[in-house]
Amino acid sequence: MIRLLALIPVLLAVSPLLGLLGLILNPPKDPFGGEPASLWMLLSDGAVFGLLLNSVYVALTSAVMSVLCGGWLAWVNYRYQYRGKRLLFLGSLLVFATPSYILAGTLRVQMNNLTVLPDFSGLWASIVCLTIVCIPYAQVIISSALTRLSGSELEAAIQLGASNRDAFTVAIWPQIKESVQLSFFISFLYAIADFGAVATLNAPVLTWRLYESIRNQDLQQASILGVLSLMAVVPVFFLVNRYRSQPNRLSNPRKVKPIPLKGNKRVLLYCVYAGLIWLGVVWPTVELCSWVVEGWQRGLSFTSQWDATFGSLVCAAIGALLTTILVIAPAWLYVQESEFYKNSTFLASALPGILLAFGLMTLTLLITKHTGGYHLVLSSGVLLFSGYAMRFLSEGFSPIASSMRQINPQLSDIAKILDRYPKPWVKNVLLPHIVPSIVRAYFLVFLACIKELPITLLLGGSTGLKTLTFRTWDRYNEALWHDAGFSGLILLLIAFMMTVVTLHWKADA
Amino acid sequence: MHNITQLSHSFGATATFQNVDLSIEQGEIVSLLGQSGCGKSTLLRCIAGLETPKNGEITIQNNVVFSSKINVQPGKRNLGLVFQDYALFPALTVRRNVGFGLKRIDEKRIDELLDLVGITECADRFPHQLSGGQQQRVSLARSLAPKPQLLLLDEPFSNIDAHRKLELGQEIRRIVEHQKISAVFVTHDQVDAFSLADRVAVMTQHNGSGTIVQIESPHVLYNNPISPEVARLTGACTFIDGTLTEDSIVETCLGKIAIQGASVSDKRNVKVLIRPENLCFNANVSGNVVIGMSCCTGPGFQLIVDVGPTRFRIPHPTYIPKGTRGTIEVLAPCLSY
């Protein structure tokens, strides 16, 4: 039974790939009766590879910059003591809550108001936005590696007269190198899969052009772009997996005593934190507020936000519930048996949301071609929630699997010896241990679902549920900024609250 | 009576132990003594049913629980198991931990066991609120709750302070006798094995897989180990090379030593087993050895004396300063190999 349940995420992981493959092998007919372009013609179009190069360039640059900045912040946080340390660290993590399309939209308006700067759009603007969004990822991954280190090596190096730089190079770098590489690949994956920022800033990259191709009903072009996206993502996914499987270091190491941060370094640190929190949290909030206030001052009518707020909450709640339920079986089998379940779960989540949504759509189209009922499937929300589940399986998987790994395997041995396995063991041992992680996983996935844009755009429209992400996107593109600001502001508030709850829960757990 | 006959186990192509035979009488405590990696814990897990042996037979109270045709589930073997790190269920109180193995909650039985192991006052606490010794007692009570016929203990004293070990060992002995059951416990510590067990089975590794090489009472095992390896496992010892010059007399670096029952016809070159308590240091200014170090052991002192490449540790009731000259006397006939 548990194996059958664990196979669902595996099937979900391969379903968009099947859809994509089906579309390539069985291209749709031209609506105007013309000959469809051959695969070779499409592939030999230089513009397509230009998009791939652009995507890689944006992802690579954003990943390098976010790792440099996030890594430096993590190191300073580990090694030094300064006023407001905890508050600034948590403040910088709030950037997690800001959706990339809101960040890009608000920054674009603000930057374009500063006439001295060039137009804030395209590739370089996307790099700025994605760097800001990815910094917390790098910061958290590297901080986590640093906190697992024993301070003894660093103190021994300093005791022997090594300079700070030498001590870092000899005692710290060899131990955190793999985590830095992991943070780079995670940031790369995030940036190359991003849709919101690149779409808002009209950057010529794969995900945005893929969406445009789908919107223009050019499914053959979309399938080629989908394959190229896969080519960019899958190798990096395997690299991420390689570094993710590195063994943990000490579980409860002796921490290094932080030294006071003084002089220029302290000024620089406060400037970086201020810049990050200002650009990633404060500025988007203030800008959205200003759009709402301006609309109110000009007497513009506001659309009621109740339905969109309700729709967002319902979609996120159902998506998070489904995802959390789906990850329990593969997490259990991963801990007990094989890496296969982890890899398949993470593969689904590594794919760009727009590609997942497109793959699901095409697979459903292929299946319902003869049976009919495509619109029924689409409007029932099955595809939307499957899309959410596939995209965020890894977010739910990590906390639950990590909590399951902490259970002493001898506890189940004892239960077997006492003939109280599995039911009493699950009730009295497993569940009390993993419930806090399940709740945390639920909050994490809820936060991710409520911010999600491309899957909601492609698969959510037919359900009849209005969501805040859809409304923010829609109104922004129609230049109804007061409405977009209102929706975006509610979305940001919910996301900030969920982030605080998640961080608080993490601290408790 | 519980029997293990010709039991073998392997992890893939690597044999863990081979052809193990062991009998445990009713009410007897048997210790499996051996170095890490010799397969003693795996043997215990095979008896418990948590690992599947390759071949052989296991009978518990004369019922076959494992053979080539039968493999009874762990929960149906009527065994108790105590792990070295206690493996208490963290979300359950002591009372619920103890009652976990009971099909129906039986408060009277739980109270009886809590009383038996002496932790009645901790009944409503959680495992993290207990000391190591208390947790071990809870673990013991939990394993005894379903009235097992055989109790298995895997390194039960390895997380206990040295001064508590003896006390807890005696407690376990009292409880096992009170419950009229048998016990097998695994340890790598000779002192633990000798203080608790009626018989000690020594496991060693040969060609990568473990096997039981000698089963005896502690006293016999200590005084008559069948090989140098068993001698080293069963207590402090030194081996010196010697040449058999006449029946039961060996010429060594300590002079002529009497050995137990060996004749010149057996072999000329032998290794002589010397236990520390079989040596005596006599201070003498014209002696041929010098004390290299004198360490306090509490009740007395240990004198470190190097004779050629061989180091001797000799117990002595009083302090003798470093550099004192003297002679080493062997008090009783030794074993030779």
Image (cartoon, rainbow, N blue to C red):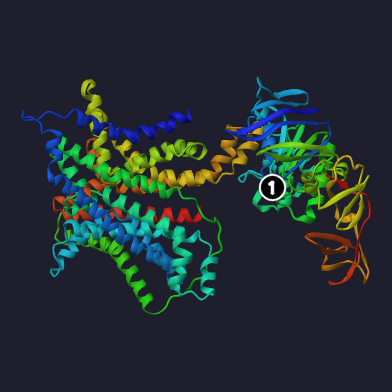
Q: Name the residue under label 1.
A: B124
- Residue A465 placement (x, y as % from top left): 26, 39
- Mark 1 closeness class: few <14, some 14–19, many ≥20 residues within 10 Å: few
Secondary-structure class at tag 1 = loop
Q: In this view, does A73 lie to the left or right of B189?
A: left
Q: Which residue is drawn at 69% across and 47% down?
A: B124
Q: Which residue is drawn at 60% across and 37% down?
A: A412
* Residue A282 visible in the displayed image: yes
Q: Residue at x 23, y 55 (%)?
A: A58
Q: In which quarter of the image is residue A75?
A: bottom left
Q: In which quarter of the image is residue B253?
A: bottom right
- Residue B86 placement (x, y as % from top left): 68, 45
Q: Residue at x 38, y 46 (%)?
A: A445
* Residue B107 visible in the displayed image: no
Counting labels gives 1
Q: Nearer the viewer, residue A215 or B168?
A: B168
Q: In this view, does A164 lie to the left or right of B313?
A: left
Chain of the residue that carries numbered disc 1 in the rendered image = B
Residue A279 lies, with reference to residue B23, above or below; the image says below
Q: Could you tell me the amino acid type at mark 1?
A: Asp
